Image (tube, grey):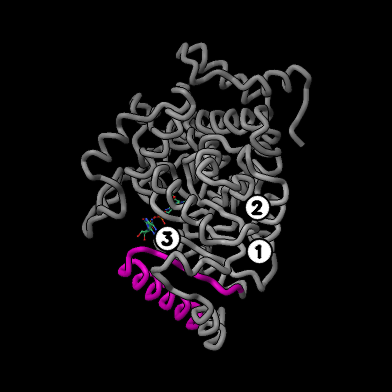
Amino acid sequence: MNKETIVGVLGAGSMGSGIAQITATQEHQVVLVDLNDDALAKAEASLKKILARLVEKERIDEVTSNKVIGRINFSNNINDFSDCGIVIEAIIENLDIKQQVFSQLEEIVSDDCILASNTSSLSIASIAAACNKADRVIGIHFFNPAPLMPLVEIIPAVQTSENTTTSARQLIDGWKKVTVLTKDTPGFIVNRVARPFYGEALKIYEEGIADFATIDWAMTELAGFKMGPFTLMDYIGNDINYTVTETVFAAFYYDPRYKPSLTQKRHSEAGWYGRKSGRGYYDYSENAVKPEPNKDKELGKQIYKRILAMLINEAADALFLNIASKEDIDLAMTNGVNYPKGLLTWADEVGLDNVLSKLEEMFQEYGEDRYRPSVLIRRMVRENKTFY
Ligand SMILES: NC(=O)c1ccc[n+]([C@@H]2O[C@H](COP(=O)([O-])OP(=O)(O)OC[C@H]3O[C@@H](n4cnc5c(N)ncnc54)[C@H](O)[C@@H]3O)[C@@H](O)[C@H]2O)c1
């Protein structure tokens, strides 16, 4: 594939229109298809607005902006994908619908066209199973907002050919994205490894150890994350974040490590989704007073060491289970969710023996499988090894 390759994008929602913007900016002709004309009109208007802002900020000139928008064919006819070299699907997260669509796509595109899904939570194998040529199906998972977040997870299914994987990765690398290769397992890298950032923070709150503002303060001021867990959950939306956790939990056969939180469920049930609904863990109304954190350093350290140990444990276990390479696991967290450091690099810095003692202390205290240290961490400490 090269710049001459026509790129198809199915679904003109938040992800699809972002992916179309990236590909058109990379000088490909793009066919952006949605069944819903309103969605297409909205995508076109929002892309024009984004490009106008880029011109205003002098990031691109008017001519380039016109060229980018001119490269996108907004269409409600899926048959317009017939000349595409790759189609990236970003429609509703529903397996039945995605399977129907993939089987329909095969009737339209040529034999060597790659079919990719941007799914966050479905298995690529199950989507590929709907196709006759399952070896051309792959997961290409962008992060929101797609034009701004560098990371793209490349997820071959068991059926995917090496050719498909190599071509897809080369293409996306050429778009100046940071690609990581991951196994087709629940949550891929980021949505799996990041679970404790939310889950452990919620548990600390539920146990009455600290309030939302204090936990957020500890994770930003002391640990260096750009956003604290509660601010981030409010930003993502508690409905969405809860659903991801529930899906990952079920997909891992109810491993207690991924157990969702009732606090988050209640917030979601109450319609307290976060920023988008004006209220989440925090109040976003105009005259709301921001709660003050308790800036007790000792308490803050306890909070951040506990969450960090759980995050490192998750990253180490992903490596132990060959979900991705150590470099890709670190790249995924710094480029997909803006972590200040890769978790395995961080583990070397704080000392894996310290991480293990924190995990063992919690495992003893709670008697819960949730806190079991990864076998890899135990082995590495025994053998006095570091990740890098
Ligand atoms: N939003 C995120 O943060 C995010 C991040 C990464 C991946 N994803 C994944 O990307 C996909 C899309 O998510 P989104 O947030 O952009 O959704 P969205 O609801 O914003 O957009 C989905 C679009 O698909 C269209 N659509 C639905 N069924 C269709 C069909 N059969 N044919 C053509 N168009 C159809 C809808 O009209 C809508 O415009 C999902 O699989 C989601 O899991 C989302």
Q: Residue 110 versus residue 17: which sits nearer the camera?
A: 110
Residue 198 shows in this picture: yes
Q: Which numbered mark, 3 or 2, is in the foreground of this view?
A: 3
Res. 176 mark: 1
The relative height of residue 34 versus residue 98 in the rendered view (above or below) is below
Residue located beneath label 3 in the image: 11
Question: Looking at the image, which residue is at 43% across and 32% down?
Answer: 199
Q: Amino acid at mark 1?
A: Lys
Percent x, y of residue 36? 33, 64
Residue located beneath label 2 in the image: 179
Question: Looking at the image, which residue is at 75% across and 30% down?
Answer: 386
**Distance in Å between CA atoms under marks 3 and 1:** 23 Å
Pointer 2 local density, CA inside 10 Å: few below 14, some 14–19, many at least 20: many
Sequence order check, earlier mark of 3 and 1 = 3
- Image quadrant in which you'd find residue 312: top right
Percent x, y of residue 155? 61, 45
Q: Amino acid at mark 2?
A: Thr
Verify whether residue 226 appears in magenta: no
Residue 340 shows in this picture: no
Secondary-structure class at tag 2 = strand
Q: Amino acid at mark 3?
A: Gly
Percent x, y of residue 376? 68, 23
Quarter of the displayed picture in which ligand 1 can be seen: bottom left
Are the residues tagged 3 and 1 within 8 Å (C-beta)? no
Q: Residue 130 versus residue 300: which sits nearer the camera?
A: 130
- Image quadrant in which you'd find residue 382: top right
